[in-house]
Amino acid sequence: MVVSHGFPRFPPAQSLAQLENLCKQLYETTDTGTRLQAEKALVEFTNSPDCLSKCQLLLERGSSSYSQLLAATCLTKLVSRTNNPLPLEQRIDIRNYVLNYLATRPKLATFVTQALIQLYARITKLGWFDCQKDEYVFRNVINDVTRFLQDSVEHCIIGVTILSQLTNEINQADTTHPLTKHRKIASSFRDSSLFDIFTLSCSLLKQASGKNLNLNDESQHGLLMQLLKLTHNCLNFDFIGTSTDESSDDLCTVQIPTSWRSAFLDSSTLQLFFDLYHSIPPSFSPLVLSCLVQIASVRRSLFNNAERAKFLSHLVDGVKRILENPQSLSDPNNYHEFCRLLARLKSNYQLGELVKVENYPEVIRLIANFTVTSLQHWEFAPNSVHYLLSLWQRLAASVPYVKATEPHMLETYTPEVTKAYITSRLESVHIILRDGLEDPLEDTGLVQQQLDQLSTIGRCEYEKTCALLVQLFDQAAQSYQELLQSASASPMDLAVQEGRLTWLVYISPSPLPRVLQLMNLTDSRLAQAGNEKLELAMLSFFEQFRKIYIGDQVQKSSKLYRRLSEVLGLNDETMVLSVFIGKIITNLKYWGRCEPITSKTLQLLNDLSIGYPFGKGSQILGKSHPDSEHFSFLGINNQSNLTDMRCRTTFYTALGRLLMVDLGEDEDQYEQFMLPLTAAFETVAQMFSTNSFNEQEAKRTLVGLVRDLRGIAFAFNAKTSFMMLFEWIYPSYMPILQRAIELWYHDPACTTPVLKLMAELVHNRSQRLQFDVSSPNGILLFRETSKMITTYGNRILTLGEVPKDQVYALKLKGISICFSMLKAALSGSYVNFGVFRLYGDDALDNALQTFIKLLLSIPHSDLLDYPKLSQSYYSLLEVLTQDHMNFIASLEPHVIMYILSSISEGLTALGNACGSPLLLLGFGGPPLTLGSPCQMLSTVLNIIIFEDCRNQWSMSRPLLGLILLNEKYFSDLRNSIVNSQPPEKQQAMHLCFENLMEGIERNLLTKNRDRWERERDREWDRDRDWEQERK
């Protein structure tokens, strides 16, 4: 064992017993207090100066596996830190020590071995570009593990695991180091080592499969598993830095480098994995199939047409062999991966190529039979059905574009797939209800996704699909009606028929007469009972019908309305709308306590109200003001939670749009509509005027009222209607809102609706806030805004320490709304802010100073952790730096530093979201000589040159200002970037930087900035082309 000079001398032996005892308490004790104390002590240990020496002591002399785990974990933390990193010599010594330790102790506890391998992988990744005597000292990874691969099975497992973990480590970006550094390391590893590792793994797999593996030997099991993991990690590598995730699984293409062609042109590589699948136990097969999924997804451009056809032929032959011997597919994991493999057949290859495969007719028959069987056994691996439907959806969608003469035979098999899906869903209803199984209908998102896929499959033979659905719908509806009329019908029988009808309503193409007849039947018994899932299905159907047949931008279907007239007497669109409105009113009346139905019903009403005059529908809802007696979800004096009234805003938004259809300048009609809201405001005002009142009743009344008003304010996007609302609420009722903030600032259930209403009132949407020249209303509105922000801000800061899990709800959410409110008021262009200073009005100063107080109370981490807060803060900061730079420049240095730091951190974490305030700070900010501008200059340059910048123009605008503030730092940074390029590119990169600043004066005048921006765009495009070529 080599103990190198990089480790300090051993500490006293008594500390070993203390550390081992702490590890035992941390991992073994059941007492929470003891565990927390041990954890606290070990955290202090990891931060202690002598942590490194104690870690070696634990590895050398520790008797407990837990102490060895602690040592490995602490060492990983030490080598990962960005501030005060370990010297290169010490990291080399630790790397060598870990390899020697693993080589001499092959039978450590699994979790200890894994932690030590993780340590090796982390050292290797972070030191990938470290040189010693012109040699990259951390890149000889294959040589490092050679001695492991030539030794016992246990050593082989360790060696393969090292390569697997290293590949995975380099493929994973972490948040503590720049993304640019990660991509640079990953690209270099891909070009220098990854193919050799993949070749080695395939070679070892061939050797393992060539030998008769003793599958009863646990060690050989472990070796095979690690080899498969290594191969999968190689194939799953992010070759071009796209950072794909599981959400894009069905669209993923593996961007294998061209230098790997030889491995995939060799048919033995593909055959190796199919042979492994058939020769190893089912418990290993999922990894084999995962590798096949990646191989099947290799980019098309890796092959020419002939090579691709040959590769596809071998792939289809392998799939055919699996389908002919499906025994292993009884394992859910195997089944899932095989479904993914089938989906990749079409996502990566064209139908015209598939039909030319020699065994295509037999393969498509086998796939169809497999799909039908899978759909019939719906309870087995239900999450895998998506991939099968995706395959058939893509196949059916490709039919019109096939130019090959060979038959695709989809007209034969797609009806079978469609029928199997429909009948299996219907048959599942009884089993689910009988056995109390999880109902797929409860996941409406999954149902909608599958139905979207089925709709494409069903179009292939639409007449057959439609005839089947109509037949099944009529049978189910007749049975349901007979059960309702029967006195002996059991609740189970009714529930089964309702479940079957629910599926049919979701699936049915467009039998509106049948659905309306069913609706009339179910509505007639709502007073006694109803079925939530069936109601949701009908609402989904109505929404689809609305998109296709209702509106001034869609074509009218004479056949549809002729049929509706014959069956139901509905002659035109207006009569259909009346039916829809009747259903909406019925749902709101009877389902007011059911949030999913209420929410979806209101969304339908809202969609119908957008941009289309209702005619009779607007008369039905516009003239009768609803209340909680008719619609229970509007209740304000009940015992439900205050947050349960969120639906009111959506409802009143729709009502507001309906009111605007015929409102014009009719103030009498407006006043009539607002009477209930006026009465509610007067009620609250009367409560506030007394010393004692029912606080809960006041809260409910006020919260319901402001939610209603916010919906109306959102709907009133025209000047005339919005001015009516403004003159109604100001000045009469604004003091009530201010009073509510004063009283209940600590209760977000009350303050959030009030603040959101105020933010809506000051939002100049569609230029609705246009006051006359002689009107002071703009200034008066801002005064009220300032007063509310100041009142809330000063009081919310008195809350003191708030638990981390409650800080957003109790504090940050309200602050975020205040930021949005202030931003809307400052950028609304309806207030001349110079008036405030001219006449000594402190409204503007109060609002801005409150913003600073609130901002300084928020840690930087919280600004970045909560997206809504980030968005509102950076948007407000953009407005301030654009129009109120004098205020920014007058702030104290520590405040300026806080803002600059938030921008710098935001650039790294959020990208372009904070580019605009940086832009203006860079151009117009004070000439600071602090470290933060240097950091921002480095960050912006790296993002523009090396990353996939979404808005290069916005991100690069502040560069000239930052460069002129930090010319010496820019010179050093330029040299660093140039030196990081390959030698053959360095001269050209240096010339680009020289051209960038050539002829540029040391000022920020418009003419000088424009000249610099033209040169910048030209050179940046060239730099990015080179960087893309290098990748």
Image (spheres, helix red, strand yellow):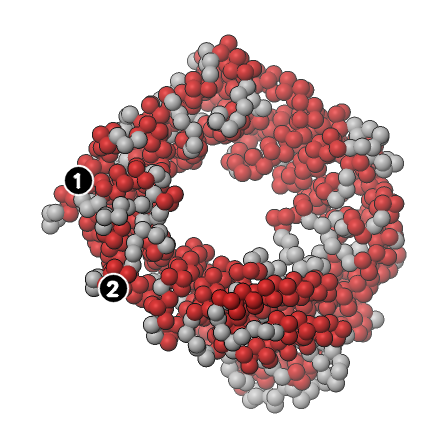
Comparing 958 with 1015, the one in front is: 1015
Q: In the rendered image, which quarter is residue 363 located in? A: top right
- Which mark, residue 224? none
Where residue 40 sits: x, y (%)? 46, 73
Comparing 155 with 393, the one in front is: 393
Q: Is residue 772 left or right of residue 968?
A: left
Residue for point 23% across, 50% down:
776
Where residue 866 sits: x, y (%)? 44, 58
Comparing 30 with 122, the one in front is: 122
Residue for point 39% across, 59% down:
879
Q: Is residue 1007 left or right of residue 244?
A: left
- Which mark, residue 837? 2
Q: What is the three-letter code of the residue carrying label 1? A: Thr
Where residue 211 sits: x, y (%)? 88, 58
Q: What is the three-letter code of the residue carrying label 2? A: Arg
Instruction: Indicate the quadrant containing the N terminus: top left, top right, bottom left or bottom right.
Output: bottom right
Residue for point 28% across, 61% down:
834
Give the spatial CA distance, label 1 vs label 2. 38 Å
Residue for point 56% across, 73% down:
1000
Name the residue tied to disc 1.
Answer: 683
Label 2: element kind: helix
- In the image, residue 994 sits, relative to residue 50, either above or below, namely above
- In the image, residue 704 sits, relative to residue 456, either above or below, namely below
Instruction: Indicate the quadrant containing the C terminus: top left, top right, bottom left or bottom right.
Output: bottom right
